[in-house]
Image (cartoon, rainbow, N blue to C red):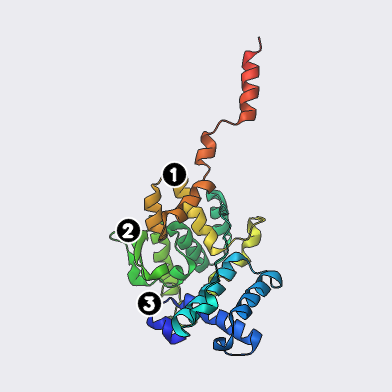
Amino acid sequence: MYKHLSFRNYSRHTVSNYIKEMNHICCHYRCSPKDLDQRQIQDYLYLLVSNKKFGPNKIAVAIASFTYFYHNIAKTTKKIKLLRSPRIPNRVPFVLSPQQVYQFIESLSTLRDKVIVQMLYSTGIRVGECVGLKRQDIHPSRMVIRIVKGKGQKDRYVPLSPMLFGQLEQYYKQYDPKDYIFYGRSKEEPMNRITVNRVIWKANFILKTKEKITPHTFRHSFATMLTEEGENLFTIQKILGHKSINSTFRYIKASKTKLKSCINPLDKIYSDNIESKP
Protein backbone atom coordinates (compact mmCIF):
# COMPACT_ATOMS: atom_id res chain seq x y z
CA MET A 1 0.00 0.00 0.00
CA TYR A 2 2.88 2.34 0.77
CA LYS A 3 4.33 1.97 -2.73
CA HIS A 4 0.90 2.33 -4.33
CA LEU A 5 0.19 5.60 -2.52
CA SER A 6 3.70 6.91 -3.15
CA PHE A 7 3.49 6.21 -6.90
CA ARG A 8 0.28 8.25 -7.01
CA ASN A 9 2.08 11.17 -5.35
CA TYR A 10 0.08 11.24 -2.11
CA SER A 11 1.59 13.35 0.65
CA ARG A 12 3.66 11.67 3.36
CA HIS A 13 1.05 12.67 5.92
CA THR A 14 -1.77 11.00 3.95
CA VAL A 15 0.32 7.89 3.31
CA SER A 16 1.11 7.62 7.02
CA ASN A 17 -2.54 8.03 8.05
CA TYR A 18 -3.89 5.50 5.53
CA ILE A 19 -1.34 2.84 6.45
CA LYS A 20 -1.92 3.43 10.16
CA GLU A 21 -5.68 2.92 9.78
CA MET A 22 -5.18 -0.29 7.80
CA ASN A 23 -2.75 -1.58 10.42
CA HIS A 24 -5.25 -0.84 13.19
CA ILE A 25 -8.07 -2.84 11.64
CA CYS A 26 -5.69 -5.72 10.84
CA CYS A 27 -4.44 -5.81 14.44
CA HIS A 28 -8.01 -5.71 15.73
CA TYR A 29 -9.10 -8.77 13.71
CA ARG A 30 -5.63 -10.34 13.54
CA CYS A 31 -5.86 -11.13 9.87
CA SER A 32 -5.11 -9.71 6.44
CA PRO A 33 -7.44 -6.91 5.27
CA LYS A 34 -8.23 -9.05 2.21
CA ASP A 35 -9.85 -11.62 4.51
CA LEU A 36 -12.28 -9.13 6.08
CA ASP A 37 -15.89 -8.99 4.96
CA GLN A 38 -18.30 -6.07 4.69
CA ARG A 39 -19.88 -6.70 8.11
CA GLN A 40 -16.53 -6.75 9.91
CA ILE A 41 -15.52 -3.40 8.43
CA GLN A 42 -18.83 -1.82 9.49
CA ASP A 43 -18.59 -3.34 12.98
CA TYR A 44 -15.07 -1.96 13.36
CA LEU A 45 -16.18 1.56 12.41
CA TYR A 46 -19.04 1.31 14.91
CA LEU A 47 -16.50 0.26 17.56
CA LEU A 48 -14.42 3.38 16.85
CA VAL A 49 -17.47 5.58 17.36
CA SER A 50 -19.09 3.83 20.33
CA ASN A 51 -16.12 2.57 22.38
CA LYS A 52 -13.16 4.69 21.38
CA LYS A 53 -15.26 7.84 20.93
CA PHE A 54 -13.62 8.81 17.63
CA GLY A 55 -14.89 12.06 16.14
CA PRO A 56 -16.25 12.42 12.59
CA ASN A 57 -12.92 13.63 11.20
CA LYS A 58 -11.05 10.53 12.37
CA ILE A 59 -13.82 8.27 11.14
CA ALA A 60 -13.65 9.98 7.75
CA VAL A 61 -9.91 9.23 7.54
CA ALA A 62 -10.52 5.57 8.40
CA ILE A 63 -13.24 5.26 5.74
CA ALA A 64 -11.02 6.99 3.16
CA SER A 65 -8.18 4.54 3.85
CA PHE A 66 -10.48 1.49 3.60
CA THR A 67 -12.05 2.84 0.40
CA TYR A 68 -8.64 3.39 -1.17
CA PHE A 69 -7.40 -0.09 -0.28
CA TYR A 70 -10.45 -2.08 -1.40
CA HIS A 71 -11.04 0.03 -4.50
CA ASN A 72 -7.49 0.46 -5.82
CA ILE A 73 -5.49 -2.46 -4.39
CA ALA A 74 -7.73 -5.38 -3.38
CA LYS A 75 -10.25 -4.61 -6.17
CA THR A 76 -13.15 -5.78 -3.96
CA THR A 77 -15.36 -2.71 -3.98
CA LYS A 78 -18.40 -4.65 -2.72
CA LYS A 79 -16.91 -4.57 0.77
CA ILE A 80 -17.03 -0.79 0.96
CA LYS A 81 -20.06 0.04 -1.21
CA LEU A 82 -22.22 0.85 1.86
CA LEU A 83 -19.64 3.06 3.56
CA ARG A 84 -20.50 6.74 3.76
CA SER A 85 -18.41 9.54 5.25
CA PRO A 86 -19.93 10.99 8.44
CA ARG A 87 -21.41 14.44 8.56
CA ILE A 88 -18.75 16.91 9.69
CA PRO A 89 -20.15 19.60 12.07
CA ASN A 90 -19.93 23.06 10.52
CA ARG A 91 -18.38 24.78 13.51
CA VAL A 92 -17.18 28.35 13.77
CA PRO A 93 -13.37 28.20 14.11
CA PHE A 94 -11.76 29.29 17.36
CA VAL A 95 -9.65 32.40 16.75
CA LEU A 96 -7.37 34.66 18.75
CA SER A 97 -7.49 38.44 18.72
CA PRO A 98 -4.41 40.31 17.42
CA GLN A 99 -3.57 41.33 21.00
CA GLN A 100 -3.74 37.71 22.15
CA VAL A 101 -1.46 36.61 19.31
CA TYR A 102 1.06 39.32 20.25
CA GLN A 103 0.93 38.26 23.90
CA PHE A 104 1.41 34.61 22.93
CA ILE A 105 4.40 35.30 20.66
CA GLU A 106 6.14 37.55 23.18
CA SER A 107 5.77 34.88 25.88
CA LEU A 108 7.94 32.42 23.92
CA SER A 109 11.50 32.17 25.20
CA THR A 110 13.53 31.52 22.04
CA LEU A 111 13.82 33.38 18.75
CA ARG A 112 13.20 30.12 16.89
CA ASP A 113 9.84 29.54 18.58
CA LYS A 114 8.78 33.16 18.02
CA VAL A 115 9.63 33.03 14.31
CA ILE A 116 7.70 29.77 13.88
CA VAL A 117 4.51 31.27 15.32
CA GLN A 118 5.08 34.54 13.43
CA MET A 119 5.40 32.50 10.23
CA LEU A 120 2.15 30.63 10.93
CA TYR A 121 0.21 33.78 11.79
CA SER A 122 1.53 36.12 9.10
CA THR A 123 1.04 33.66 6.22
CA GLY A 124 -1.82 31.37 7.31
CA ILE A 125 0.13 28.30 6.17
CA ARG A 126 -0.39 24.82 7.60
CA VAL A 127 2.09 23.34 10.06
CA GLY A 128 3.29 20.76 7.49
CA GLU A 129 3.92 23.56 4.99
CA CYS A 130 5.76 25.56 7.64
CA VAL A 131 8.28 22.86 8.53
CA GLY A 132 8.82 22.12 4.83
CA LEU A 133 9.93 25.67 4.01
CA LYS A 134 13.41 26.13 2.57
CA ARG A 135 15.54 29.26 2.35
CA GLN A 136 15.08 29.30 -1.42
CA ASP A 137 11.30 29.61 -0.95
CA ILE A 138 11.65 33.12 0.51
CA HIS A 139 11.51 35.80 -2.20
CA PRO A 140 12.28 39.20 -0.63
CA SER A 141 12.42 40.97 -4.02
CA ARG A 142 8.72 40.19 -4.53
CA MET A 143 7.88 39.97 -0.80
CA VAL A 144 6.28 36.55 -1.19
CA ILE A 145 6.89 33.02 0.08
CA ARG A 146 6.51 30.05 -2.23
CA ILE A 147 4.70 27.08 -0.74
CA VAL A 148 5.89 23.98 -2.59
CA LYS A 149 3.62 20.94 -2.70
CA GLY A 150 1.05 22.16 -0.21
CA LYS A 151 -2.17 20.26 0.46
CA GLY A 152 -3.20 18.44 -2.70
CA GLN A 153 0.41 18.68 -3.97
CA LYS A 154 -0.28 22.23 -5.19
CA ASP A 155 2.15 25.16 -5.18
CA ARG A 156 1.07 28.68 -4.26
CA TYR A 157 2.43 32.01 -3.03
CA VAL A 158 1.66 33.69 0.28
CA PRO A 159 2.60 37.23 1.39
CA LEU A 160 5.94 37.89 3.12
CA SER A 161 5.50 40.38 5.94
CA PRO A 162 8.29 43.02 6.23
CA MET A 163 8.28 42.35 9.99
CA LEU A 164 8.68 38.60 9.41
CA PHE A 165 11.46 39.18 6.87
CA GLY A 166 13.41 41.18 9.44
CA GLN A 167 12.89 38.42 12.02
CA LEU A 168 14.05 35.80 9.52
CA GLU A 169 17.31 37.70 8.94
CA GLN A 170 17.98 37.66 12.69
CA TYR A 171 17.03 33.99 12.79
CA TYR A 172 19.46 33.17 9.97
CA LYS A 173 22.33 34.85 11.84
CA GLN A 174 21.60 33.00 15.07
CA TYR A 175 20.65 29.52 13.80
CA ASP A 176 22.37 29.43 10.38
CA PRO A 177 19.94 27.08 8.59
CA LYS A 178 21.38 25.46 5.46
CA ASP A 179 18.40 24.10 3.52
CA TYR A 180 15.27 23.87 5.63
CA ILE A 181 14.49 27.07 7.55
CA PHE A 182 13.22 25.14 10.56
CA TYR A 183 15.45 22.09 10.74
CA GLY A 184 15.37 18.99 12.92
CA ARG A 185 18.20 17.14 14.60
CA SER A 186 20.42 17.87 11.63
CA LYS A 187 20.33 20.87 9.32
CA GLU A 188 19.67 18.58 6.35
CA GLU A 189 16.25 17.43 7.57
CA PRO A 190 13.06 19.39 8.35
CA MET A 191 11.72 19.89 11.82
CA ASN A 192 9.06 17.39 12.84
CA ARG A 193 5.57 18.89 13.00
CA ILE A 194 5.25 17.34 16.46
CA THR A 195 7.96 19.74 17.64
CA VAL A 196 5.87 22.72 16.50
CA ASN A 197 2.81 21.27 18.25
CA ARG A 198 4.85 20.87 21.44
CA VAL A 199 6.14 24.46 21.30
CA ILE A 200 2.59 25.81 21.09
CA TRP A 201 1.16 23.33 23.57
CA LYS A 202 3.69 24.33 26.23
CA ALA A 203 2.65 27.99 25.90
CA ASN A 204 -1.10 27.30 26.04
CA PHE A 205 -1.31 28.42 29.66
CA ILE A 206 -0.30 31.98 28.76
CA LEU A 207 -3.70 33.09 27.43
CA LYS A 208 -5.79 30.93 29.78
CA THR A 209 -8.35 30.15 27.08
CA LYS A 210 -10.84 27.31 27.43
CA GLU A 211 -10.09 26.22 23.87
CA LYS A 212 -6.85 24.42 23.06
CA ILE A 213 -4.44 26.52 20.98
CA THR A 214 -2.85 24.62 18.07
CA PRO A 215 -0.82 25.63 15.01
CA HIS A 216 -4.09 25.70 13.04
CA THR A 217 -5.47 28.31 15.46
CA PHE A 218 -3.07 30.85 13.97
CA ARG A 219 -4.23 29.94 10.46
CA HIS A 220 -7.84 30.55 11.52
CA SER A 221 -6.87 33.81 13.23
CA PHE A 222 -4.98 35.01 10.14
CA ALA A 223 -7.93 34.35 7.82
CA THR A 224 -10.44 35.89 10.20
CA MET A 225 -8.33 39.03 10.59
CA LEU A 226 -8.13 39.42 6.79
CA THR A 227 -11.91 38.99 6.56
CA GLU A 228 -12.49 41.65 9.21
CA GLU A 229 -10.16 44.00 7.36
CA GLY A 230 -12.32 43.65 4.24
CA GLU A 231 -10.02 41.47 2.13
CA ASN A 232 -11.62 39.74 -0.87
CA LEU A 233 -12.68 36.16 -0.08
CA PHE A 234 -11.22 34.82 -3.33
CA THR A 235 -7.85 36.34 -2.41
CA ILE A 236 -8.04 34.69 1.02
CA GLN A 237 -8.95 31.39 -0.68
CA LYS A 238 -5.81 31.56 -2.85
CA ILE A 239 -3.57 32.45 0.09
CA LEU A 240 -4.92 29.61 2.23
CA GLY A 241 -4.83 27.11 -0.63
CA HIS A 242 -8.49 26.10 -0.29
CA LYS A 243 -9.83 23.99 -3.13
CA SER A 244 -13.38 25.20 -2.52
CA ILE A 245 -14.55 28.71 -1.65
CA ASN A 246 -16.97 27.08 0.81
CA SER A 247 -14.01 26.32 3.08
CA THR A 248 -13.19 30.03 3.12
CA PHE A 249 -16.76 31.17 3.77
CA ARG A 250 -16.66 29.93 7.36
CA TYR A 251 -14.34 32.78 8.30
CA ILE A 252 -17.22 35.16 7.69
CA LYS A 253 -18.96 33.42 10.62
CA ALA A 254 -15.93 33.97 12.86
CA SER A 255 -15.57 37.60 11.75
CA LYS A 256 -16.90 40.42 13.96
CA THR A 257 -17.34 42.81 11.01
CA LYS A 258 -20.99 41.98 10.39
CA LEU A 259 -21.74 41.84 14.12
CA LYS A 260 -20.27 45.31 14.67
CA SER A 261 -22.60 46.82 12.05
CA CYS A 262 -25.71 45.20 13.54
CA ILE A 263 -27.93 47.21 15.86
CA ASN A 264 -28.50 45.26 19.06
CA PRO A 265 -32.27 45.04 19.77
CA LEU A 266 -31.75 45.57 23.51
CA ASP A 267 -29.77 48.77 22.89
CA LYS A 268 -32.41 49.97 20.42
CA ILE A 269 -35.45 49.61 22.69
CA TYR A 270 -33.71 51.44 25.51
CA SER A 271 -32.34 54.21 23.30
CA ASP A 272 -35.75 54.71 21.64
CA ASN A 273 -37.55 54.91 24.96
CA ILE A 274 -35.02 57.27 26.51
CA GLU A 275 -35.24 59.57 23.51
CA SER A 276 -39.06 59.56 23.63
CA LYS A 277 -39.15 60.59 27.27
CA PRO A 278 -39.80 64.34 27.83
Q: At label 3, which amino acid type do we have?
A: Asp
Give the residue pinned by disc 2.
143
Q: Residue at x 63, y 55 (%)?
A: 207
Give the residue pinned by disc 3.
179
- Which element type, helix, strand or loop, lies under badge 2? loop
Would you say the residues marked 3 and 1 are in contact, meaning their CB atoms lie under 8 Å apart? no
Residue 10 is situated, as x and y percent measured from the top left of the image, at: 42, 76
Going from N to C along the chain, the mark reached first, 3 or 1, is: 3
Looking at the image, which is closer to me, 40 or 29?
40
Which residue occupies the extreme front position in the image?
A: 78
**In this view, the mark in front (3 or 1):** 1
Would you say the residues marked 1 and 2 are in contact, meaning their CB atoms lie under 8 Å apart? no
Going from N to C along the chain, the mark reached first, 3 or 2, is: 2
| Image height of 257 relative to 191, above or below | above
**In this view, the mark in front (1 or 2):** 1
Residue 102 is situated, as x and y percent measured from the top left of the image, at: 53, 54
Give the residue pinned by disc 1.
229
Q: CA distance from mark 3 to mark 2?
A: 20 Å
